[in-house]
Image (cartoon, rainbow, N blue to C red):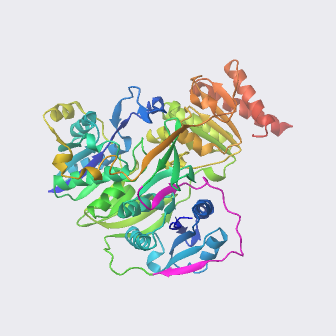
Amino acid sequence: MGKSCGPVWVIAEQIDCRILAVSFQLINHGRKLATALDTSVDAILLGHKMEEHPRQLFAAGGDRVYLGNDPELAVYQPEIYTEIIEKLAKEKKPEIILIGSTSMGRELAPLIAARLEAGLTAHCIDLVIDGNKVLESRIPAYGGLLSIICPDRRPQMATIAAGVFPNPEPDENRTGEIIPIEVPKEIPRRIQTLKVVREELEGMDLESAPIIVAGGAGAGDPAGWREIADLAKVLNAALGATRPAVDEGWAALETMIGQSGKMVSPELYIGVGLSGELQHMVGISGAKIMVAINNDAKSPVFEQVDYGIVDDCREFVPVFIEKIKEYQEKLKTC
Amino acid sequence: MFKIVVCVKAVPDPKEACNIKIDPATKTLMRCDVPMVLNPLDKYALEAALQFKAEFDAHISVLSMGPPEAGNIVKECLALGADRGFLLSDRAFAGADAFATAYTLAKGIEKNGPYDVVFCGMASSDGSTEWVGPEIATFLKIPVVTRIKEIVEYNGQWWTVKAELENGYRLVRVQIPAVFTVTRELNTPRRLSFSGIIKARKKEITRWGIQELGVPEESVGLKGSPSMVSTIASMDSRRKVEILEGKREEKAEQLVQRLVNAGAI
């Protein structure tokens, strides 16, 4: 056996003292990576009034929790969080650092990576250890699956969206070591989070919706997009979007499905006017039944769904809505 | 004078990006003549700068790293109202990941001289990493706020901005100089005007390579990149599709029937 490598780290994230599901999912998968590398899975948890929370991370599979428990850490403060993690990483030399692809993670990950001169792969859909004990981070791109590696530098870093890896089965009997960390004194304080405001999201929550209707560039214009939104309404479905639809300004960024958006697993997915780009499709690969409506019979989307409608979505959707309504009326009268 | 730097990227036109494929043998992109355009989110970064310029005396420098053809998008930014355009272009810069890109851009920003704020688009449409803005800030040793959707206060050295968050926002106070990466909610980008295009004709783009930036070869491009593509696999479709045939009405009818039978609706 060679010299064992540094630990696998998970930067856990909490909002209002609640640890996010993605943090547990990363510990769960980090466990597998750590087993392949014969090392431990350690979590970094920063917050306030979090004394009891490391238990949950142990139950999920964590070996150690570095706990920063301080009023200054209650909400994400970029300078302080970066400084703490950089300092600790330089001391403990983790082999791998995993971070959730959340708003915080997407800012914090590059700040840490740049300080550590580390490679960072964005929004991975799988992570494996290869034959050379190097982390392979997989991302979809241009119709293929790319494996990104950082052969020479450590740590190897990656961000992963919620839902990519499964939730662990918590083992309440597992215990671990809690290592307190202090807020360093000498930090430039040029940036401060004054407050965090959460708003109620309009419409259905994508992650929990049993039916999702997603629209793409094929909607054509805002009127076409409204048709797709109407279809979602009739089906009591959540409305999702591809990146081009978000780029066009028809849909909000929060509704984007895919590698750099949300990962969802509905019972039924209906993709309207979209071409089946992998970056989008990986986000709904967990759907039970999939339907695509696209006017191009050769579109790659038709290789990735159960039912296909080759038609102009702007013409077809209104007819489809009518047929659904007819069916719903029939149900009522029976 | 208030100095603004805007970092922009030439990306394959997102509307045609589905035509780009990877050559499995060479692991390189087969671009198939997909035109390069200004990254959509960078338009919002430039617009933020242009709105400052309209309000008070400000000077806007636009920087891009890319192949010689990327000069066109720098030219486009000049036509939209930027004052100076820089293209960081050199064979040695090729193959850069986000880290090496941010390093090169940061060196370009430093060479250009003092600045008050740097605006970047939140992400590029081709890479989608969101890493370059925060990494530039790290190299420049200044603060960064990502995903801003509103600039609430901008008088003096301390600014207040709203940064997008899942279902909400962060209200952040930050000391400039700072880097801001912007979302679409920040503004509505202007369109190119004919007079802008005419004016931009007279403006020259400054081209800097590795010599001008004075950076070591091993810290830029592929050599300066911690991460690299190792393998490319094709993804298999895992479903067998049934294409529903017939007139529009019939297809809709059949689809409803299929979904009802499957218990999906």
Residue B243 forms part of the magenta stretch: no
Q: Which of A132 and B96 is in front in this view?
A: A132
Measured as percent of width and height from the top left, residue B226 is found at 39, 53
Q: Which of A252 and B134 is in front in this view?
A: B134
Task: Name the residue at 39% across, 44% down.
Answer: B124
Res A311 → quadrant: top right
Question: Would you say B124 lies left or right of B89 here?
Answer: right
* Image quadrant in which the N terminus of chain A is located: bottom right
Task: Name the residue at 25% across, 49% down.
Answer: B217
* Image quadrant in which the C terminus of chain A is located: top right
Above or below B89: residue A218: above
Measured as percent of width and height from the top left, residue A193 is found at 40, 69
Residue A161 forms part of the magenta stretch: yes
Measured as percent of width and height from the top left, residue A69 is found at 50, 80
Residue extending farthest to the top is: B247
Res B245 → quadrant: top right
Report whether residue A124 is seen.
yes
Label count reads 0
Residues rendered magenta in the picture: A152-181
Question: Would you say B227 lies left or right of B207 here?
Answer: right
Res B251 → quadrant: top right
Task: Name the residue at 40% across, 30% down.
Answer: B31
